[in-house]
Image: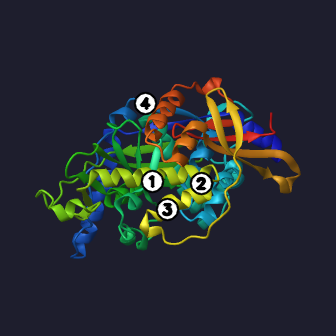
């Protein structure tokens, strides 16, 4: 039964509503003003926030179609733990844990929503599921609609292990992601991800909280343009809506040119949620190292990943794991190197497996630490961008960041 249901889920196409308009902005501003009044009545200062604006590209595209395997792939990559002894599980866990939470579409088009089983979860499990679907949905929106498939936790790029400690201690469990495209002129997107299964009013509250949390990155000299986004996914009973708002960045409090000592630092805090990047080259280097580490983990080359992690000082020592001998899979868009693992062996489907890997040339250039990594990554991004959803296998997801996820033994 699980085998047949997995096939139908993967073969279905799911539609999602996208929202970014003035009515949404007005609803969130009302939430912000109401909360500010509550603080005034208590004689306390209101938390700093940003006034959101409409994202024109989302406003112009109110509907979006996706496949389940693309969402499961994105959840798996975005939520890969930094620690190697945990990251080896991440490639398959999203498919194993969450495919049943997507409704059985009988192989046809339908609205994306959660299955009845998922909606009957207890509160804590439901919250976790909503958070991780919110992360995956936001990541997929950024990849497919903003052409920003590469990502890193912002705190890694800023080289400060306590950058968001106050946010996390406050119970706001969503990490902030930096997402970008491989074109050197492409924008850096700082993305705050939210998700819930209740009312649209709760999504407005999540957007309001996101506006209080999402940081601004300002490059002191050079660097890419930066755009901050708050993306809240409402997993409604009948349909799913993804709300997207743009909180314009604050001007840094300290606008003086950085000193020579400050230029050596990756970042410095200049406001409540504003970080200046005086050393754009070092910031780029750290984002590249972190992304290479993620790709190596996805291909199960753990020792190679550990070398990158050792250069990102806050991660500390980690237990070494053996590298796996890469396996090869050939697709119509290229050759991928990685590993295949059993998907549901406990259900008696021994032939059903999940292959996760990285495009062959990209992986080779990363291992070699070649200067050609970024050129190869750009070429892959451009090639995968133009694939037609209806012409690709529903059992295969090829991401623009060079990773793949393929369900095998189901055809």
Q: Secondary structure at mark 4?
A: loop
- Residue under the point 23% across and 75% down: 44
Dot placed on the residue nearer the N-terminal end, 1 or 4: 4
Instruction: Give the image location of residue 132, x and y in percent.
Output: 56, 55
Dot placed on the residue nearer the N-terminal end, 2 or 3: 2
Instruction: Give the image location of residue 375, x and y in percent.
Output: 44, 35
The reply, left or right, for residue 85 in relation to residue 401 is right
User: CA separation, marks 4 and 2?
Assistant: 34 Å
Instruction: From the image, tell me which residue sits under label 3.
Output: 309
Dot placed on the residue nearer the N-terminal end, 4 or 2: 4
Please indicate, yes or no, whether residue 270 appears anywhere in the rendered image: no
Tag on residue 289?
1
Tag on residue 61?
4
Instruction: From the image, tell me which residue sits under label 2.
Output: 297
User: CA separation, marks 3 and 4?
Assistant: 39 Å
Dot placed on the residue nearer the N-terminal end, 1 or 2: 1
């Amino acid at each position: 039964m699980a085998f047949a249901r997995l096939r139908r889920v993967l073969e279905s196409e799911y539609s999602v509503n996208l929202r970014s308009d003035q009515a949404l902005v007005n609803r969130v501003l009302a939430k912000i003003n109401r909360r500010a009044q509550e603080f005034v009545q208590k004689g306390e200062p209101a938390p700093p926030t940003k006034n959101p604006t409409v994202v024109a590209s989302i406003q112009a595209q109110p509907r979006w179609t996706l496949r389940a395997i693309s969402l499961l792939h994105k959840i798996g990559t975005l939520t890969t733990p930094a620690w190697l002894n945990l990251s080896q599980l991440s490639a398959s866990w999203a498919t194993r844990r969450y495919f049943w939470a997507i409704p059985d579409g009988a192989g046809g088009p339908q609205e994306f929503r959660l299955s009845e089983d998922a909606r009957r979860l207890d509160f804590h499990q439901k919250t976790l599921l909503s958070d991780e679907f919110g992360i995956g949905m936001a990541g997929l929106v950024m990849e497919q609609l903003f052409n920003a498939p590469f990502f890193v936790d912002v705190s890694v790029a800023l080289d400060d292990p306590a950058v968001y400690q106050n946010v996390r201690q406050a119970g706001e469990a969503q990490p902030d992601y930096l997402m970008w495209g491989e074109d050197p002129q492409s924008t850096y997107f700082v993305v705050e991800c939210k998700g819930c299964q209740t009312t649209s009013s709760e999504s407005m509250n999540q957007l309001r909280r996101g506006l209080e949390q999402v940081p601004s990155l300002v490059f002191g000299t050079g660097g890419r343009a930066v755009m901050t986004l708050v993306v809240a996914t409402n997993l409604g009973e009948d349909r799913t809506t993804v709300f997207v708002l743009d909180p314009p960045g604050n001007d840094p409090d300290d606008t003086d040119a950085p000193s020579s000592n400050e230029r050596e630092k990756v970042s410095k805090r200049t406001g409540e949620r504003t970080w200046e990047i005086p050393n754009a080259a070092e910031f780029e280097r750290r984002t590249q190292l972190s992304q290479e580490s993620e790709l190596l983990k996805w291909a199960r080359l753990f020792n190679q990943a550990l070398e990158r992690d050792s250069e990102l000082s806050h991660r500390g020592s980690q237990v070494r794991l053996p590298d796996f001998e890469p396996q090869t899979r050939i697709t119509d868009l290229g050759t991928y190197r990685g590993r295949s693992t059993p998907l549901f062996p406990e259900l008696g489907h021994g032939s059903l497996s999940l292959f996760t890997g990285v495009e062959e040339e990209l992986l080779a250039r990363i291992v070699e630490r070649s200067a050609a990594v970024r050129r190869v990554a750009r070429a892959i991004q451009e090639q995968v961008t133009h694939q037609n959803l209806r012409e690709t296998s529903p059992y295969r997801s090829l991401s623009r960041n060079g990773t793949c996820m393929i369900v095998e033994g189901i055809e």
